[in-house]
Image (tube, rainbow, N blue to C red):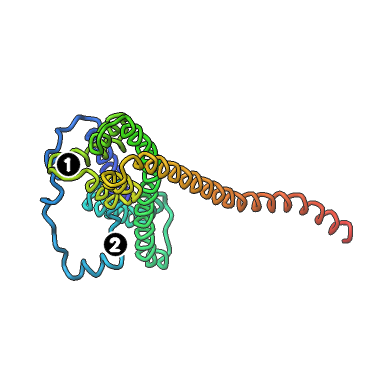
C-alpha cells in the first residue's frame, strides 16, 4: 500500500511540474535585461574559472559551445538538461518496479539487486540522448544558417552593385529579411556599430562562435573591398554559387545515406516474408515424408 501511495505521489508531482512549466511558457514574461546586455557587450561577461577536476572532465567531454551559441542557449541550460535527463533515467526503473509491485508482481532478489546498475545505464543513455538531440538540432539549424548566408551574399552583391559602400551594403542587405538568422546578423552589425568596430570583424567572430565559417567569408570579402574595388561583386556572387553547390552536395550525400539506411529494414521485411512463405511448404514436405 505504501508503494502505491509513493507511486501516486511521484506521478502527481511530475504532472504538477509539467503544468507549471506549461503555464510558464504560455504566460508572457518580462524581458531579461541581462542577456540583452550580454549580446551587446559579450566581452564584459564574467568568466568563471572551473576547478581542476572540472577542467579534466571538460577536456574529456567538452561542452558544445558553438552549438549552444547557435541555439542561443547557455552552458547552464546544457548542464540542467543533462541533469534532468539523468534523473529521469534514474527514476524510470524505480518507477517501473513500483508499478509492478503495486500490480502484485513480486520481483526476485537478483532483479532488485541489479536495479541499481540498470538505473545507472538508463541514466547514461538518457544523458547521451539529450546531448545527441542538442547536436542534431544544432546541425539542422546550421544548415539553415548556411542557406541564408548564401542568399545574404547575393543581396550584399546587389547592394554593392547599386553603388553603396561596404558597411552600408552589409546593413541594407540585412534589413531585407525578417528571419531569425538575419536577426542574428543584424545583431552582429548593431554590435559593430555600437562599439565602433568594423562589421566584417564582427561577422567573422559570429561565424567562429556558432560554427558557421561561411559567415566569416562575407566579412573577409568585404574587408578586401578597398583593394579589390569592382571585383567584390563578382567575388560575392562566385562565393554564393559555390556555397549553394556545397549545400546541394551535402543534401545529396544525406539523401544517399538515408536511402542506404532504409535498405536494412527492407531486407529484414523481405526475410520475414520469405520465412512466412517457406515455412508452410517445409511443413507440408515434412508431413508428407513422415
Element type where label 1 sits in the image: helix
The quadrant in which residue 236 appears is top left
Q: Earlier in the sequence, mark 2 or mark 1?
A: 2
Which quadrant of the view contains residue 93?
A: bottom left
Establish if 108 lies above or below 269: below
Q: Nearer the viewer, residue 263 or 182?
A: 182
Q: In the depicted view, which residue is nearer to us: 251 or 215?
A: 215
Front disc: 2 or 1: 1
User: Residue placed at 41% from the left, 49% from the top?
Assistant: 103
Q: Report which residue position mark 1 lands on.
A: 191
Q: Is residue 8 something that shows in the picture?
A: no
In this figure, which residue is indicated by the disc labeled 2?
62
Residue 170 at x, y = what percent?
Answer: 27, 37
Residue that lies at the very extreme toward the right in this rendered image? 289
Q: Would you call the spot at circle 2 few (<14 residues within 10 Å), some (14-19), or many (20 or more)?
A: few
Residue 138 x %, y %: 35, 48
Which residue shows up at 24% across the image and 52% down it? 80
Position of residue 118 in the picture relative to residue 268 (left or right): left
In this rendering, would 58 be left or right of 281?
Answer: left
Counting other residues with Cα less than 10 Å from the Cα at mark 1, is it few (<14), some (14-19), or many (20 or more)? some
Find numbered disc 2 in the image and state the secondary structure of the residue it sits on: loop
Q: How many marks?
A: 2
**Near-viewer residue (174 or 126):** 174
Quadrant (top left/top right/bottom left/bottom right) for the C terminus: bottom right
Residue at mark 2 to residue at mark 1: CA–CA distance = 28 Å
- Pick the front one: 67 or 91: 67
Residue 154 in the image: state x and y as whole percent. Answer: 38, 36
Amino acid at each position: 500500500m505504501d508503494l502505491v501511495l509513493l507511486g501516486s505521489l511521484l506521478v502527481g508531482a511530475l504532472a504538477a511540474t509539467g503544468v507549471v512549466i506549461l503555464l510558464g511558457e504560455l504566460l508572457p514574461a518580462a524581458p531579461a535585461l541581462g542577456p540583452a546586455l550580454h549580446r551587446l557587450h559579450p566581452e564584459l561577461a564574467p568568466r568563471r574559472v572551473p576547478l581542476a577536476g572540472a577542467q579534466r572532465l571538460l577536456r574529456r567531454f567538452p561542452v558544445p559551445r558553438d552549438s549552444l551559441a547557435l541555439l542561443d542557449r547557455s552552458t547552464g541550460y546544457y548542464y540542467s538538461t543533462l541533469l534532468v535527463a539523468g534523473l529521469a533515467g534514474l527514476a524510470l526503473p524505480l518507477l517501473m518496479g513500483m508499478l509492478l509491485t503495486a500490480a502484485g508482481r513480486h520481483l526476485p532478489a537478483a532483479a532488485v539487486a541489479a536495479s541499481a546498475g540498470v538505473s545507472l545505464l538508463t541514466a547514461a543513455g538518457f544523458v547521451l540522448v539529450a546531448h545527441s538531440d542538442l547536436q542534431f538540432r544544432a546541425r539542422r539549424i546550421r544548415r539553415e544558417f548556411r542557406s541564408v548566408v548564401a542568399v545574404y551574399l547575393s543581396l550584399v552583391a546587389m547592394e554593392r552593385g547599386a553603388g553603396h559602400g561596404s558597411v552600408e551594403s552589409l546593413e541594407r542587405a540585412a534589413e531585407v529579411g525578417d528571419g531569425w538568422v538575419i536577426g542574428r546578423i543584424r545583431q552582429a552589425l548593431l554590435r559593430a556599430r555600437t562599439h565602433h568596430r568594423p562589421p566584417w570583424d564582427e561577422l567573422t567572430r559570429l561565424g567562429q562562435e556558432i560554427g558557421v565559417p561561411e559567415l566569416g567569408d562575407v566579412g573577409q570579402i568585404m574587408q578586401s573591398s578597398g583593394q579589390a574595388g569592382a571585383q567584390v561583386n563578382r567575388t560575392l556572387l562566385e562565393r554564393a554559387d559555390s556555397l549553394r553547390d556545397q549545400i546541394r552536395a551535402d543534401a545529396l550525400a544525406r539523401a544517399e545515406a538515408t536511402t542506404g539506411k532504409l535498405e536494412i529494414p527492407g531486407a529484414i521485411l523481405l526475410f520475414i516474408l520469405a520465412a512466412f512463405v517457406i515455412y508452410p511448404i517445409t511443413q507440408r514436405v515434412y508431413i508428407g515424408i513422415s
